[in-house]
Amino acid sequence: MARWLFKSEPSTWSWDQQVAAGAAGTFWNGVRNHLAKKQLMAMQVGEQGFFYHSNEGKAVVGIVEVIRPYYPDHTDESGRFGMVDVRAVEALPRPVTLDAIKAESALKDMVLVNNSRLSVQPVTEAEWALVRRMGGLA
């Protein structure tokens, strides 16, 4: 099962808003990068990802789950991009900052470290386990 990282600016869509969406979750729209689009297209229902606050906070703050696979993004007038639906699963007891991730040598190859502008990113199983531990989850 693949793992992911979803980036959002808290002023646009925050972890608290994701949690407030409840079990019904919400769509993850607005992706306009072709590599990120490929990541969204690869996602399967039940796969999980980190919810990352970008620009403000710069930290992994929670875990979301894909609840609907890729479908057209209603905000894309070109019709070229799509989205998935996600729901909040759990918050990290301790947010894991970008600085902490960069300081961890085992995470030096993480996409977040090497291509921080990509809004939707794959995460390896080893990265997933380590960031979870850093955030206070087993």
Image (cartoon, grey):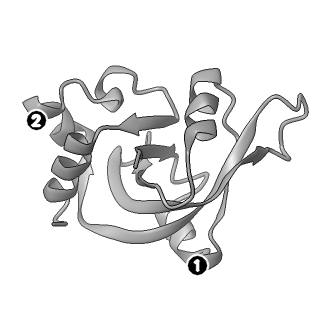
Q: Tell me the amino acid under the disc marked 1.
A: Ala
Query: Element type at marker 2?
Result: loop
Residue ID at (55%, 34%): 39
Task: Note whether 88 is above or below 134 in the view shown.
Answer: below
Name the disc covering residue 104, or none: 2
Q: Percent from the top left, x then y, of residue 94?
A: 21, 63
| Few, some or many residues within 10 Å of mark 1 (<14, 14–19, 20+) | few
48, 102: nearer the viewer? 48
Q: Would you say residue 29 is visible in this rendering?
A: no
Q: Residue at x 14, y 57 (%)?
A: 133
The vertical placement of 112 against 138, above or below, is above
Estimate the x, y position of residue 129 in percent, counting from the top left: 20, 51
Q: Is residue 104 visible?
A: yes
Residue 82 in the image, given as x and y percentages of width and height: 74, 40
Q: Please give left or right for residue 70 compared with residue 23 in the image.
A: right
**Residue pointed to by mark 1:** 23
Left or right: 122 as drawn, with respect to 113 = right
Q: Residue at x 32, y 48 (%)?
A: 59
Look at the numbered disc 1 and give the secondary structure of its residue.
Answer: helix
> Which of pointers 2 and 1 indicates the residue nearer the eye?
1
